[in-house]
C-alpha cells in the first residue's frame, strides 16, 4: 500500500496513516559491502564460520546497515505530488531490537505521526518499524523526520 497525496500541503490529512512495504533480502554480500564501506569488519558481520558458533548462530547485519536501508525500504510508501525534493531531516530515536541474520528478509511499516508546515516545506515525522520475517520482535524502530519541499 502507498499513502498518496497531491501536494506537501496535503500531508496533514494523512497523519495517523500506515503503509507497509515489500520484503527485501539482506544477504551476506550486502553485509560485506557495508563492512567495507564503513571499515567495520567485526567477525559477527563478516565471518560466517566463526559467527555460526557465536551468539546469533550466523552472521548479522550491522545495525547501521539496517538503518541505512530505511530509504530503500520506505521509498514507495509515501507518494507526495508537487514535490521538488525530499530531504532526510534526521532521527529523533532509533532502537535496534532484533538482529538481522544474513539471508533474512526485512520490510518496513511507516506510520505518519506529524506534518508541520515550515518556511522550507512540510516536515513529516514518521515511526518506522523494520520487521524481520518470522521474528517476534522488530529489527528496529525509528522516529524519522523528512522535509518535503514543494515544487
Image: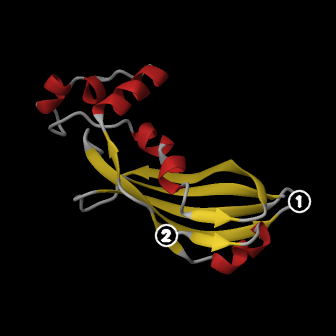
The answer to whether any part of residue 98 appears in the image is no
Quickly name the residue at label 2.
19
Q: Secondary structure at mark 1?
A: loop
The CA span between labels 2 and 1 is 27 Å
**What residue do we see at 57% from left, 78% from top?**
16
The answer to whether any part of residue 49 appears in the image is yes
In-front residue for pair 16/55: 16
**What residue do we see at 42% from left, 28% from top?**
34
Q: Is residue 69 left or right of residue 97?
A: right
Q: Is residue 24 left or right of residue 79?
A: left
- Which quarter of the figure has residue 45? top left
Quickly name the residue at label 1.
119
Q: Is residue 4 left or right of residue 84?
A: left
In-front residue for pair 21/114: 21
Q: Position of residue 101 (x, y in %)?
A: 25, 41
- Which quarter of the figure has residue 44? top left
* Colour mode of the rendering: secondary structure
Where is 139 relative to 12, above or below?
above
The furthest residue to the right = 119
Q: Secondary structure at mark 2?
A: strand
Mark 2: give few (<14), some (14-19) or many (20+) Cα within 10 Å: some
Q: Position of residue 113 (x, y in %)?
A: 60, 71
Mark 1: give few (<14), some (14-19) or many (20+) Cα within 10 Å: few
Where is 24 relative to 121, above or below?
above
Amino acid at each position: 500500500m502507498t499513502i498518496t497525496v497531491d501536494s506537501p500541503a496535503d500531508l496533514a490529512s494523512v497523519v495517523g496513516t500506515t503503509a507497509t512495504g515489500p520484503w527485501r533480502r539482506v544477504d551476506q554480500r550486502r553485509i560485506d559491502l557495508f563492512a567495507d564501506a564503513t571499515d567495520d569488519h567485526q567477525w559477527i558481520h563478516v565471518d560466517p564460520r566463526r559467527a555460526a558458533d557465536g551468539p546469533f548462530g550466523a552472521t548479522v547485519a550491522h545495525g547501521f546497515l539496517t538503518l541505512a536501508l530505511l530509504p530503500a525500504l520506505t521509498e514507495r510508501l509515501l507518494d507526495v505530488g508537487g514535490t521538488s525534493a525530499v530531504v532526510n531531516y534526521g532521527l529523533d530515536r532509533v532502537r535496534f531490537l532484533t538482529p538481522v541474520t544474513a539471508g533474512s528478509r526485512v520490510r518496513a511499516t511507516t506510520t505518519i505521526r506529524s506534518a508541520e508546515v515550515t518556511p522550507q516545506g512540510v516536515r513529516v515525522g514518521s515511526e518506522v518499524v523494520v520487521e524481520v520475517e518470522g521474528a517476534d520482535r522488530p529489527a528496529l524502530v525509528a522516529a524519522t523526520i523528512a522535509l518535503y519541499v514543494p515544487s
